[in-house]
Image (spheres, rainbow, N blue to C red):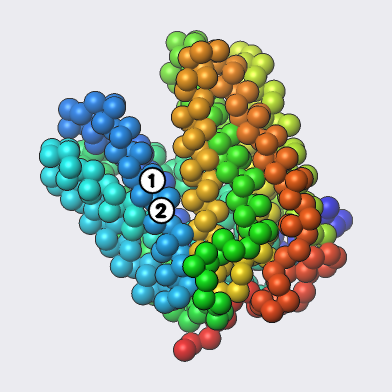
């Protein structure tokens, strides 16, 4: 629950901290290639005369490669440091997309190889940023707000990114847009890894174990839950397309997606502006319950105006749930695996979203648009059930031998020491 006062300084307090604005902006710019990847690939393939089927195949290959690469690169960051992994990965990923942009979709084998390279080497900037917040901000209440700000900034990126891409396509071409977006991605990664916190950050010593972060039962429980949150979100995307088609109004789809993002933005801003007491694991169960409850009214499929309002409501608890999940990840990640653990959350959420889209498609065709939104409600409820079923596991954060974690109850400690920030 929240304390009775607004957190001092709010988001401005975070952005005024040394290096914080640079790290956040660099991470967002660095993630532009991945955030706009599906749209960019679709526009490029169609401009080359390829089919939507080919576009979908390339997007799927890119997504699978990204899902595989994120935790592997996250583990490499924990072992080798950020600059030695993030920047080379960003360059290789950009070169993969540049190869596609310069050679086109023929031969197909080369096109698929290019997107696999681009996806596999997508740098884990998202997990890296969350690993840096403790050393940059110090106090746990500020880190909590930073996680909320991070979730809000993602909504802005996923809205502004496609708009920038569309502008570049209109000014030049889809191929040029691919090149520019990926060049920006390298510059964003460069801005992060050249910063003092990134260069100084070192993961805590880790126990050698082939499972890495996945040996934590609490982390596995969280990943299981957020797989279904991702499934719910992916199904909404497909169901919203069907809703717009039913009304022969393609623009409605964009409106619903914008409303969903607006809801997440508003929820994240409100959540991060408060100081929260108590265990984040308990708070996360409440937030996922509210998230699931807000998905359910979408099955009513009312007129566009009401549906837009319901979409805003459906998005309100997404960013707060993600921000709270970031705290839980930090508490349950085994010593020395924090970047890898955050990367697993990104991967699991993305795989769940892809499966949600795959399930919602045939569901809509067989049973109608409302059934597609029902998949979202079912996904949200299943995510809650996973958290309830694993409550005992989640109630036991990192083992005593691990780094000091955030407080379980009451006020946060003055300083946290999640990962080391000292030069070697």
Judge from the rendering whether residue 381 lies leftward or rightward of residue 372; answer left or right: right
For the point 29% across and 56% down, which residue is it? 93
The answer to whether the residue labelled 1 contacts the one labelled 2, judged by CB atoms less than 8 Å apart, is: yes
User: According to the image, label 2 marks what residue?
Assistant: 68
Q: Secondary structure at mark 1?
A: helix
Residue 64, which numbered label?
A: 1
Q: Secondary structure at mark 2?
A: helix
Q: Is residue 25 visible?
A: no
Residue at x-position 78% and y-position 59%: 395
Kindly report the distance in space between the C-alpha atoms of the residues bearing marks 1 and 2.
6 Å
Residue drawn at 52 percent across, 40 percent down: 352
In the image, 5: left or right of 73? right
Q: Residues within 10 Å of mark 1 (few under 14, many from 20)?
A: some
| Frontmost residue, 92 versus 120 | 120
Q: Residue at x 18, y 50 (%)?
A: 99
Q: Relative to 310, is 76 above or below?
A: below
Q: Which mark is residue 265?
A: none
> Is there any visible trace of residue 83 in the rendered image?
yes
């Amino acid at each position: 629950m929240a304390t009775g006062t607004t957190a001092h300084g709010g988001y401005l307090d975070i952005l005024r901290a040394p290096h914080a604005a640079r790290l956040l902006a660099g991470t967002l710019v660095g993630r532009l290639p991945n955030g706009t990847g599906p749209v960019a690939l679709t526009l490029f393939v169609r401009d080359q005369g390829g089919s939507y089927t080919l576009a979908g195949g390339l997007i799927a290959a890119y997504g699978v490669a990204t899902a595989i690469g994120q935790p592997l690169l996250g583990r490499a960051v924990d072992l080798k440091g950020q600059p030695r992994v993030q920047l080379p990965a960003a360059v290789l990923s950009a070169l993969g997309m540049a190869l596609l942009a310069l050679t086109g979709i023929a031969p197909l084998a080369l096109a698929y190889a290019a997107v696999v390279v681009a996806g596999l080497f997508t740098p884990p900037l998202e997990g890296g940023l969350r690993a840096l917040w403790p050393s940059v901000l110090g106090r746990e209440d500020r880190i909590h707000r930073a996680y909320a700000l991070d979730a809000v900034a993602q909504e802005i990126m996923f809205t502004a990114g496609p708009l920038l891409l569309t502008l570049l396509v209109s000014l030049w071409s889809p191929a040029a847009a691919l090149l520019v977006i990926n060049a920006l991605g390298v510059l964003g990664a460069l801005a992060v890894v050249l910063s003092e916190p990134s260069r100084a950050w070192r993961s805590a010593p880790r126990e050698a174990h082939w499972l890495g972060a996945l040996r934590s039962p609490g982390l596995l429980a969280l990943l299981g839950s957020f797989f279904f949150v991702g499934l719910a979100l992916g199904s909404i995307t497909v169901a919203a397309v069907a809703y717009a088609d039913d009304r022969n109004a393609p623009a409605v789809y964009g409106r619903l997606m914008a409303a969903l993002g607006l809801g997440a933005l508003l929820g994240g801003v409100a959540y991060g502006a408060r100081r929260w007491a108590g265990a984040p694991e308990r708070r996360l169960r409440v937030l996922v319950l509210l998230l699931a409850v807000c998905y359910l009214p979408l099955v009513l499929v009312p007129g566009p105006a009401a549906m837009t309002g319901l979409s805003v409501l459906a998005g309100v608890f997404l960013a707060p749930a993600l921000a709270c999940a970031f705290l839980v990840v930090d508490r349950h990640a085994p010593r020395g695996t924090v970047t890898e653990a955050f990367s697993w959350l990104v991967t699991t959420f993305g795989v769940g979203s892809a499966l949600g889209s795959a399930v919602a498609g045939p569901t809509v065709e067989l049973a109608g648009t409302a059934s597609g939104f029902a998949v979202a409600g079912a996904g949200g409820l299943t995510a809650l059930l996973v958290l309830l079923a694993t409550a005992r596991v989640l109630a036991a954060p990192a083992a005593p031998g691990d780094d000091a974690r955030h407080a379980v109850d009451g006020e946060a400690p003055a300083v946290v020491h999640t990962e080391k920030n000292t030069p070697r």
